Image (cartoon, helix red, strand yellow):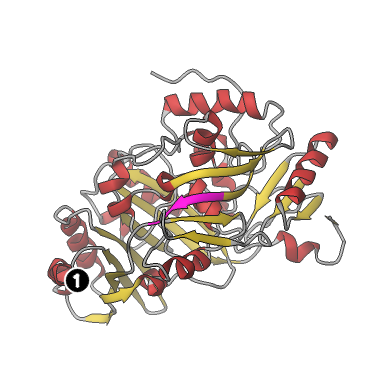
Amino acid sequence: MLHRNDPGYDAERTGFQLLDPHRPDLIVPAATPEDVRRAVAHAAEAGLPVAVQATGHGLPQAATEGVLITTGRMNAVTINPDTATARIEAGVRWEQVIEAAARHGLAPLSGSSPSVGAVSYTLGGGLGLLARTYGYAADRVRAVDVVTADAELRHVTPGDDLFWALVGGRAGFGVVTALEIGLVPVARLYGGALHFEQVETALRTWRDWTETVPDEMTSSIAIIPFPGRTVAHIRITYTGDPREGEELVRPLRAIGPRLLDTVGEMPYTASAAIHNDPTTPSGYFATHSLLRELPDVTPLLGVRGVIEVRHLGGALARPQGAPNAVGNRDARYFAAVLSPGLAPGTDVAALRPAHDAVHDALSPWATGGRLLNFLYGANAGPEQVRRAYEPEDYARLTALKAKWDPDHLFRLNHPIPPEVVTPTP
């Protein structure tokens, strides 16, 4: 255990998100499920709330008290090629699963960055590179090992109400020590990135193009400001025949002169190059909206910061596998504003007006929903978390919280209160 002022405390509490790292009373660097069980037992006996962190990419509100359980040392991966499944421990990063699965011609439903923690990503939904073809990563969960508030290690499977709550509820119902997940038969794909200076043309062309593509095509666009210019970065992942993929991408290539074009056939093990997400820890502030449609791109132009829009729908709208709590499947687009490169402790209040202006302008087409994995920092409060679920599912989650964690021990992540909530008509 590490207390404040102990050597190694600062290094252990700090993950990828540097804007406002955890500052708990006590840190337990867990290497085994038994370490987790003992930490939860200690916290429950002492009346201390619990937070959990693997890599810290999707850090919710920072813990300023209680016990932080870090899981990065729990990093074993086991692939079963016969059942096309993987068993992944709580600290595993996607890059480990990608490499292990590729040896058998398989792939996980990983996200844009292979350095992200696979378990927390999956339990929060998991909007990945193959999303429109195969759905949310959460839909592939087969079993969960979890330490609940009574300090019991449990193995839960579909049909168990705790399984339903955990898969979509992330760390609100316990500390997950391992998952069993399904893999998909993807060894290679047609994908990569297109970069243009014709930002408005690129954005409008991509928006119109998404109305025509099949479910095998998952794509997004980012508007990225650089010193002296702004660049449109279109990201492509196509799981069908590469020759068909080339034809599908032809309208995008016609946007204009390309600053960079890396789209082509590639192994899934090279898929990190599609988004080319940063790998160095940094501070960032982000907000997002879910949209029914995207008829007007004007609000996305001339904004300070990075704008990202992802095309949803396809298999995301058709739940697969065991039922879970992931909500807002009717959204067709995800639109986010990101302020990167922030120094630790930056007051984000000055950034909010620019973020709010974008989302206010998009509000006529917004569903009002949220995606749990994209709720960071101060934006991960109770009301925002509530909007990550369908009203009836949120009511069920709060009732299950009262059953499994009545003292709200796990309140330092994305908070779900232990109470009975009546769905809003």
Taking the spot 25% from the left edge, 48% from the top edge, the residue there is 314
Image coords of residue 189 (percent x, y): 28, 69
Q: Which residue is mark 1?
A: 242
Q: Is residue 269 above or below residue 348?
A: below
Whether residue 181 appears in magenta in the rendering, the answer is yes
Local packing at callout 1 (Cα closer than 10 Å; few below 14, some 14-19, many 20+) is some
Q: Main secondary structure of the magenta part?
A: strand
Magenta stretch containing residue 118, yes or no?
Answer: no
Give the quadrant of residue 185.
bottom left
Q: Is residue 75 left or right of residue 139?
A: right
The picture places residue 173, in percent across and down from the top left corner, at 61, 36
Up-down relation of residue 64 to residue 385 (above or below)? below
Query: In this rendering, is residue 2 above or below 159?
Result: below
Pick the quarter of the image with the C terminus. Answer: top left
Amino acid identity at mark 1:
Pro
Asked if residue 290 lies left or right of residue 59, the reply is left
Region of the chain picked out in magenta, as a range: 179-183
Image coordinates of residue 318 in percent, x first then y, are 29, 40
Q: Residue at x 49, y 71 (%)?
A: 278
Q: Nearest the camera: 135 or 224?
A: 135
